[in-house]
Image (tube, grey):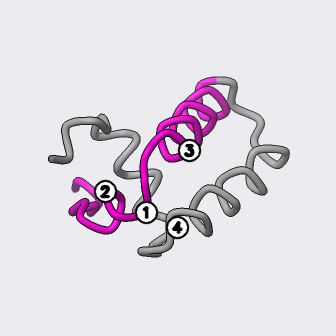
Amino acid sequence: MNTIFTVEESNLISIFASKNRTKVMRDISNAIPHLDDEEMIDLSLRVVDKLKAMSDEVFAKLDIESAE
């Protein structure tokens, strides 16, 4: 079920550690202006877009944890 996110995307979501999809989107969006790395900005925007496209119910079922 977690195949919609890459390892990097899942790691980013796990940093914001919330089961609330809207809060994760807001927190990632708020962090973007403080990022200097273009790849990290692109990753963040991609994650926000994917989160916008899914329902709260689908998000709640995801098993998001960071990869070591």
Secondary structure state at the residue bearing disc 1: helix
Looking at the rendering, the stretch of residues picked out in magenta corresponds to 39-68
Q: Does the magenta stretch include residue 26?
A: no
Secondary structure state at the residue bearing disc 3: helix
Check disc 4 and give the amino acid type: Phe
The answer to whether marks 4 and 3 mark residues whose Cβ atoms lie closer than 8 Å is: no
Above or below: residue 31 compared with residue 46:
below
Residue 17 figure quarter: bottom left
Q: Where is residue 36 in the image (x, y as percent from the top left)?
A: 77, 35
- Residue beneath disc 2: 58
Residue at 59%, 25% in the rendered image: 39
Q: How far apart are marks 2 and 1 (CA)?
A: 6 Å
First in sequence, mark 2 or 3: give its number: 3
- Residue beneath disc 4: 16
Q: In this view, does 28 lie to the left or right of 15?
A: right
- Residue beneath disc 3: 52
